[in-house]
Amino acid sequence: MLEYLVKRIASILPTLVFVSMLIFGLQQLLPGDPAVILAGEERDPNVVAYLHQKLRLDDPLPVRYAYWVGGVVRGDLGESVRTQQPVLELIVQKLPVTIELALLAMTVALVIGVPAGLISAVGRGTAWDYGANAFALWGLSTPNFWLGILMILLFSVHLGWLPASGYVSPFESLGANLAAMAMPAFVLGNAIAAVLMRHTRSAMLQVLQADYVRTARAKGLRERSVVLKHALRNALTPIITLGALEFGTLLSGAVLTEQVFTIPGFGKLIVDSVFNRDYAVVQGVVLVTATAYITLNLLADLAYFAVNPRLRR
Amino acid sequence: MTTAAVLSDEGQLAAPARTEAGPWRRAWRRLRRRKSAVFGLAVVAIFVVLAVFAPWLAPFDPIETSWSAIRQAPSATHWFGTDDIGRDVLSRVVWGTRASLLAGVVSVSISLAFGVPIGLAAGFVGGFVDALISRLTDAFLACPFLILAIALAAFLGPNLTNAMIAIGISATPIFVRLTRAQVINVKVEDFIEAARALGNSPLRIALRHVLPNVLPPLIVQATLAIAAAVIAEASLSFLGLGQQPPAPSWGSMLNTAKNYVDNAPWMAIWPGLAIFVLVLAFNLLGDGLRDALDPRQG
């Protein structure tokens, strides 16, 4: 087991190295002198000179990469040309908002997706199955920023039930926070619910054909107990592992959702940085996202390993 | 290029050629039997017609503003209403089909052009090449698709061409991984062994024997990837990183529309519906193709 753990953890190192190269490489896509572009629209010669020296633009590429990576390892992701704040500090400030949105969206996705997949698998070929499949197709085909606008139209403009935009900290008012997050969480969770529904359906269909399910039925157990206790428990493992892979979709979706509902999170930070030509922040956001994704996948793998006794031998 | 044509010039390999000639026709027959897939194909065809004949089908000039027709509700003259500067929404939706379809097709072509040869090399050559390509693919896949596309579009500069390049590059690793996995399965088959025993060069075996046999899942993935690319282009345009105004694009129309939800909801409804219907059509077609081409998945 220890050997597996060490191997699995070691396997992410080359990926992290390549991710860092990829993100460092983004800077090379800028046409012309990066220092001039990074200095923003004012192009203050002092800033340009400062950036030239700070980014070591006169050094060869591998040397610059080594310095950059050295900084990253120490937690120095550079600083925002706009606010002069360290990039890491900016990201840490915005992260809790996006984490809350992501957790709420994942809850929505699990609450809708897993039961829908379960019903669809148990009632294969029935109207329920078609209904659940139609829902999944709808979830996968609807651009979430459009769904967000439609929900604002219905729940804010016509019914006046929920605020159209803005964010209230849960420490300030939990009720106002949940009211502001309800629509964004649903919009973001909707697409993932569709994916989870499909995963749950196929995992359940597979498990329902297993011998132990037939044994459970032969023992005379009630169908409800067979499905929920014997089948679903076994189907949940792949669902959770595959669900963890949806983290990327969640973050991509958060960028758009935060834009529609004006939520000051991680996604809004990257979009604002793009328009402010604050490239260090863009790089920082991509780096943190990728590292979080790799770590989550590792955790999902380890969780899978922990709950599956057959792998531990 | 059909598999039959590829294999028929090898006299010795006539047997696999004959069994391979059937599957494509059978797949087409299976596809035609699936109503949802046929519906998807028909809708895609309608959008292609809209894109090609946009100049003749759109009732108004999509970028002509009219200060006397600002934010007018749908009427007999303007079926889908007008936008914040008096442009006809229907005409903009019709013209917007071009940007969306172009982005879908071009970006997936970019992904295929890079992803398939790289995946083929990784799977076929193996060893160090495979390890290197696989780690690189992992690195790309670790960056969420849209976030990577946003970063690429930001560094390349915001316009439709760069958005297509950014989406294409971001989607490439999926094709590398899929091609590699398929190639690893196919290269141990007996007919590949036979081709090698006949003295064919590795390049020839890879291109003429392995590649045609890994095509079906790639076609399915490409169709579904077009759906994802259409949404990605709309997303980038919505964020201001794709098609630049005043050129019509569904995503940028929605970006403007979100500011007028309370008094001109039609501005948001039609372009969003267009994205939804086109993406749904590609998803239905992709699901149908999967069942028709890949019996194991069905």
Image: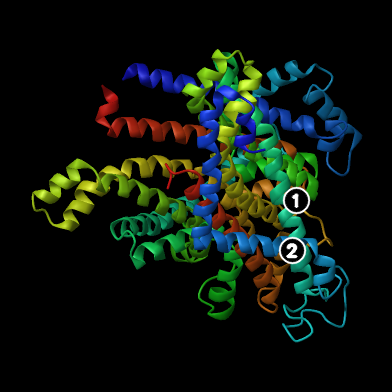
Would you call the spot at circle 1 few (<14 residues within 10 Å), some (14-19), or many (20 or more)? many
Q: Which residue was labeled with disc 1? A: B241
Secondary structure at numbered mark 2: helix
Give residue B49's mark.
Answer: 2
User: What is the x, y in percent for residue B21?
Assistant: 55, 39
Where does the C terminus of chain A fall, quadrant-wise? top left
Residue type, mark 2 in image: Val
User: What is the x, y in percent for residue B258?
Assistant: 68, 67
**Labels 2, 1: one chain:** yes
Q: Is residue B170 left or right of residue A13?
A: right
Asked where in the image residue B248 lies, by quadrant, the reply is bottom right
Residue type, mark 1 in image: Leu
- Image height of A52 relative to B262, above or below: above
Asked where in the image residue A59 lies, by quadrant, the reply is top right
Identify the chain of the residue marked 1, using the numbered disc in the image: B
Any part of residue B266 in sight: yes
Q: Earlier in the sequence, mark 2 or mark 1?
A: 2
